[in-house]
Image (cartoon, rainbow, N blue to C red):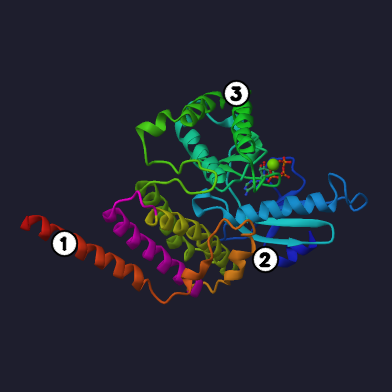
Amino acid sequence: MKELQERFPDYTLSPIGTTSHVNVLRLSKDGHPALVAKTIWHDASDPEGDMGIKAQDNAYMNEVEILTMLPSWWGIHLVDHFKTPQNRVIVTNEVQNVPWNSYKKGSNDAQIAELLFKQISWLHSHRIAHDDLELKNILLTDSATPIIIDFEKSNLKATKEQLQNDYNVLLRNMKEHANTESIGIILQDLLKGKSLEKNSGKYIQMSSHKYDITLQGVNKWACEEIKQVGKIVAVKDKGLQRAYARSTLNGMAYLRDAIYQLITDSKNPDYIKDELQILHDKVVRIMKHLIKDFDIDMKDIQEFNKNKVLSPLNYLNESSSSSSKERTRKNRKNRKSNRKNTRKH
Ligand SMILES: Nc1ncnc2c1ncn2[C@@H]1O[C@H](COP(=O)(O)OP(=O)(O)OP(=O)(O)O)[C@@H](O)[C@H]1O
Ligand SMILES: [Mg+2]
């Protein structure tokens, strides 16, 4: 495709892997990670129809908006997106995937189920119903990491029933496929909360509006995001590097909101809040560095946050979190004097 080649002049375009997808292309360049471009075509003769411009534009916007929101641990990032007269094009990093029918049944069922549960929980905690959870929309890496893709049909303001339907569809599809049947059973257990009781704090749990996450969960999430920051500098291509930085920054904005919610939750004891405040400040500091070092325009982050899931990003303009430090000092002082008072009595 002419426009795609113009935007990625040094990349070689070829059909993707062994799939019969005519609309998905692979972009490769020596010494660089490969990319994947998906084109969404529209039927100009029937603008109102299923394949008409309105429907296809919606699909494109959905996919771009969700890809922009995804945290970096997902494993797929938006690299570029643009419109041509006939097509809408979405470019992401390539995932080296193995087809589900070559997955060795039982070998990594628990890991796959847990990661799928984590991804679906993340979508649902943002009120996103995927709405097309077929196996072909779940890539599987050779290290048995499932990656949910294809958000064209997703619903960004889903009802509880629509969210529940994701599991119904996925579990039905897994049951019909011998290789994934047992993954479905574990997933069902996770859903019932059996494993959650045993491993509380391990998952980002489901909630329709808010982050329902524990201190342990938020720490793990932060570790993953911070690890991702370290990887950005290793990307040689400057444009790609910026795209990764933008995607990581976006993931960190969600992390920051989740931490902030825990800090303001009156149920959490002070000592946990102190620890969270330190983590919060560290995350904000890294976000500011990313903006500066990779010259990120904040409008890019806000552009696809139309459903207002993210809180306003004003905190990035504040010079430092002195108020929070005060709070921490005060709390320590209070606790100290409280202890003294107790001793006096
Ligand atoms: N980032 C990627 N890395 C590797 N393969 C990919 C990637 N994105 C898409 N693919 C491959 O292309 C196929 C089609 O992608 P996707 O589902 O996003 O497009 P689609 O047009 O909606 O296809 P379908 O109608 O079959 O769902 C995937 O099933 C997968 O095999
Ligand atoms: Mg698909």
Q: What percent of the width, then of the height, locates residue 37?
A: 69, 54
Q: Residue furthest right?
A: 45
Q: Which residue is mark 1?
A: 336
Q: Residue at x 62, y 52 (%)?
A: 66
Sequence-wise first label, 3 or 1: 3
Mark 1: amino acid: Lys
Mark 3: amino acid: Lys
| Picture quadrant of residue 280 | bottom left
Task: Out of 169 and 264, give the one closest to the viewer.
Answer: 264
Mark 1–mark 2 Cα distance, whole angstroms, equals 63 Å
Q: Residue at x 87, y 46 (%)?
A: 49
Per the rendered image, the range of residues in magenta is 265-292
Mark 2: amino acid: Asp
Q: Residues within 10 Å of mark 2 (few under 14, many from 20)?
A: few
Q: Which residue is mark 2?
A: 10
Is 343 situated left or right of 295 in this image? left
Sequence-wise first label, 2 or 3: 2
Q: Secondary structure at mark 1?
A: helix
Q: Residue at x 58, y 72 (%)?
A: 297
**Label 1, ligand 1: CB separation under 8 Å:** no
